[in-house]
Amino acid sequence: MKKHLILLFLLTLSFGMTAQKTQEQAAPTSSNKHAIGLGAGSGFALDYSYKINNRFSISSRFNMLAYSVEELEEEVDGQNVLIDATVDFKNIDIVFSYYPFNTAFRLIGGVGYFTDNSLNINLSFDEKVTIGEVDFTSDQVGEITIDNKWQQISPYAGIAFGRAVPNSKFGFAVELGTYFSGAPEVSLDATGIIENTKNQESLLEDSFSELKYRPYLSLRLSYSI
Amino acid sequence: MKIINKLICTLLFMGITSCDIDKITSLKDDFRITVTPDAVDNKKEIQINNATNSNPVTSDIKMSISGDAASNIYTSDGSSSFKFDQGKIVIGLKKGMEPSPENPIHASVKVEAEGYLSKTKILTFDGSGSESININLLKIDDLPKTIQIVEETGALSDDETTTDIEVSITSSDETEELAKIVLEAGSSFEDNNGEPVEGSNLVMNIETYELQTQIVDEQTGYSATEEIEEITIPASRDDEEATLDPFSVISVDTTLDGTPVNISENTPAKVNVFVPDDGQEYQVFFVEKGSNTAIPIPSLVGNVANRSVGSNAFTQLQFEAFLNGLYFIAIKIYQSAFCSEDLTTLTFSNNMAADVYRITLKEDGNIKSSSNVTLFNGEETTIQFHPKNDRIYSLTVINKGKDVLNQEIICGMVYPTFELGVTETASYVIPMGITCPSVSIALDETPIYYKSIGENTFYPYGKAVAGELNSSPKLDPNTDYQFQFFYEITRTTEAILGSEIEELIDSYDLDEICVEIEAEI
């Protein structure tokens, strides 16, 4: 269902884009060559863009997504667990924008270099566990740590509505894209009396192998300099 | 061109969204948290056997544990009540405690069984995984002549003995007086805190072990050296080149109205122990039961010895001691030169299937150390000793009655690891875990035993680690086998044909097993 909605959204955008193109064709071209931008969406972004010509521009940008949740109560396999999760992505991208319709719509391609690219999940028990007469406090029960790490260099492709270097002083853009990061390297560690949960590593590897594409969404405000 | 552009855009985003989200969202439902059924790590599987015939001791066995770690020792299923089944129990340190070879944890276990001499043994937890320990108990009715028990009783009045109580033990060949202990009239008694103890009926129990004692048994191969823990030599300026050499083992237990007591410091017992007249100089040490530290007698008593003036030779050593109901071992200092400054280390490995090996080291034909060692695949064990110049050492290793190794040990030689493995391994891995709807369980550090239907004795089959059993012995496909492991009780399977082991798990009704497991949990 989610896939269908996204597809519908994209098709709608595509038709909308055609309509927009007719209006913008009449817009005068600008002599602005440089711009800086601030973005927010799937993280925060800071960029610099240079307009090569009316069809192409090049951008260098720094993206950061650092987010964590702590002690999220969940039930996993019948056990009440507390989940701590940390996402830490920091990357520097070099991307080219191509304006196929001579409008603000652009196709973007490039490469990202990730200095940090991990997703860590930590599960601990909410309650004590008793085996015979022996009580194990939630600390003594142990914890499950799942680390996902993606490759450092990832190709990027996306589309945006809004110019990299705006025609006027300020510009606004929406960008949607993805890094082709490959399947993450998954490691699972478990300690204490749940140590044998390590046997779930292959399940995790299989599930997380689907996370080959890292989505990118940005609402960008730019300023031409 | 417009159409192509639109197509590119659409395809691009189809690609973006093409991942199988279901796999991620169902992960929470599919993920299984495996809780171990074991409350302990560093397991010790203790098997109590009759020293004379290697049969498990089936009478009511009592085990008490002392030492700093005692309160953290439980059975696998988390019980502090130590119940033996067919002479077997598995104990260990509460999970989370992390001893290491550098920081081991020691505990002293005392094993008592009706009709047998009690025995105290030190357990060392050093983080090196589970260990199988055989403890051989001597049946009182069937003692070798070289192990003697003498019991004397006495009456107390006003908490003091009214007459002299004397216990004398002569060697089995009646050539030596092994020990004579005299409690003079007026002796009084204390508890472990040094507080006076009241009572009226005194029982003094003396056990002596002559060290040449051996019981020739294929499985146990009992020797009295088992009664002595490895002893740490106290640092001494004068004894840099000396080693402690036990020559007499005496156990003294004193009870007052059934309660263990110590002899008061004010009325020490007079003790005579026999010392061979061989021109060597001797010193005597106490070794408390359940301890591996020798305490020099002079630090315990005022009047140490009656050594002849100007001579190192004497035949009897007399001293006064506050016998504290614990082991007493007399030890001589051997002053011959050693062949090497360094300890000789003999390492034994098993890279084949699990087996039990009887490893015996003899010095001039007398047993210096002898023990049954269970080595699972990939495990090692070592013997360390300080060989002397003028002695001949021989090493033998026996497996199921057959010599695996027969080697003369030459002073100063460095020996490579002796590989003892003899039993071929099977190529398959046997799963030792199960996932049920409400719980996943995996056996860990759990020894599995087996025997063919025609045999009486179970042999080690392998050790289940993290829910898997590797390197098990290759079985005869046409023979029926039984398998056994211990969890709360000894659990033994029905007979299974050797050829069916590999498919064993698949053939079980897992639903039925899960119902049973869930009912137990």
Image (cartoon, rainbow, N blue to C red):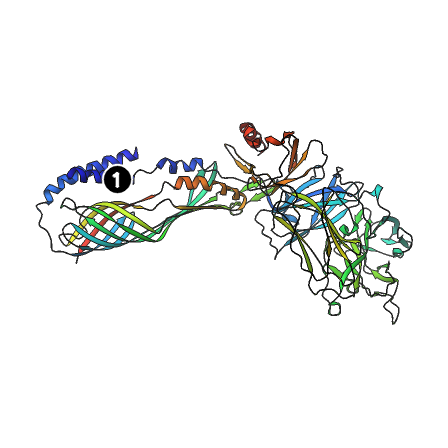
Question: Is residue B275 rendered to the left or right of residue B239?
Answer: right
Q: Position of residue B191 (x, y in %)?
A: 77, 53
Q: Is residue B233 above or below residue B79?
A: below
Name the foreground residue: B152 vs B281. B281
| Total labels drawn | 1
Residue farthest bottom in this picture: B310
Q: Amino acid at mark 1?
A: Phe
Q: Quadrant of residue B354?
A: top right
What residue is shown with label 1? B13
Q: Quadrant of residue B284?
A: bottom right
Q: Quadrant of residue A136?
A: top right
Q: Position of residue B385 (x, y in %)?
A: 72, 58
Name the foreground residue: B138 vs B192. B138
Question: Is residue B354 rendered to the left or right of residue B312?
Answer: left
Name the foreground residue: B305 vs B471. B471
Q: Position of residue A88 (x, y in %)?
A: 36, 51
Question: Is residue A127 rendered to the left or right of residue B118?
Answer: left
The quadrant in which the C terminus of chain B is found is top right
Question: Is residue B138 rendered to the left or right of residue A125?
Answer: right
Pointer 1 chain: B
